[in-house]
Image (spheres, rainbow, N blue to C red):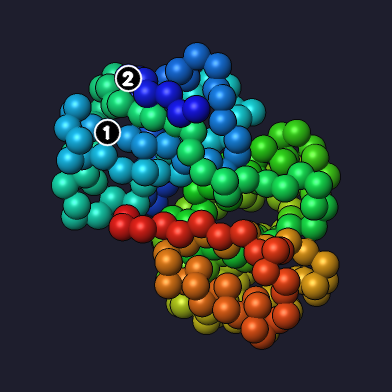
Amino acid sequence: MPVELKVKIKEIIRRNYNVKSFRLEPPGDLDFKAGQFLSVQLKDDPRLKKYLSISSSPTEKCYLEFTKKLTESDFSKVLDDLKAGDQVTIQYPFGKFVLDESFSKIVFLSGGIGITPIRSICKYVVDKNLGNDIVLVYANRSVRDVVFKEDFDAMVKNYSNLKVAHVLCETEPGFKCTVGRINAQVIKNEVSDYRERKFYLCGPPQMVEAMCKLLLEELGIAKERVVTENFQGY
């Protein structure tokens, strides 16, 4: 059952020009599964409440982290002004976007800030050395929009069964990527054994819907091998 707690912000990390991670003092034992989400309420105001994915892994015991794309919303503006030591009210855990550890081969298809629960799951797999073979295909407009690049670079170095393939709308000299959007050919190129894998999709609803259709109709992936999470209203 989800619990509600007041917790202090321990540290704030800028991930790129419009994304920040907020690390919270651990509220006792961290009782969640990688990929789940929490609610965050600011200034005890129910109008300033959002559901956000947990971007840290249960293996990272020193904090509970959520990561937010900062927009012009009232919630984002108040969140952006918070400092270490300030308090927020959280409720957690929620959600079923969690790893099926029995499935050895996994593909994550993600766009933008949809990477947050995937970062949690991948970090958990790497830290636990679970052995799952993972391919992440991560779409963004440009390099400056990529979130957790350093984290994934480190994970790839430490875990030989993780591959990260970037797909960008804009080219970037010296940055290895496919230019364009995720389509059937990109998946075939990056995941040669895609028919043997379970797919996890996370991103804006339109992207998730398009990827689901692509997998089911163009690539013939069985519906039970597709797990989805939609990110409503950044």
Task: Residue 50: tell me if it is visible.
Answer: yes
Q: Quadrant of the C terminus?
A: bottom left
Q: Position of residue 125 (x, y in %)?
A: 72, 41
Mark 2 belongs to which amino acid? Lys
SS state under label 2:
strand
Task: Residue 174: tell me if it is visible.
Answer: no
Q: Quadrant of residue 127?
A: top right
Q: Position of residue 27 (x, y in %)?
A: 45, 18
Residue where numbered disc 2 is placed? 6
Residue ID at (16%, 47%): 74
Q: Is residue 198 above or below residue 45?
A: below
SS state under label 1:
strand
Please tell me how many numbered marks the rendered image carries.
2
Other-residue count near label 1 (Cα within 10 Å), few / some / many at <14 / 14–19 / ≥20:
many
Looking at marks 1 and 2 on the same chain, the residue that comes earlier in the sequence is marked by: 2
Residue where numbered disc 1 is placed? 41
Q: Position of residue 94 (x, y in %)?
A: 48, 38
Q: Is residue 144 above or below residue 64?
A: below
Other-residue count near label 2 (Cα within 10 Å), few / some / many at <14 / 14–19 / ≥20:
some
- Numbered tag placed on residue 118 in the rendering: none
Mark 1 belongs to which amino acid? Gln
Q: Position of residue 217 (x, y in %)?
A: 64, 83
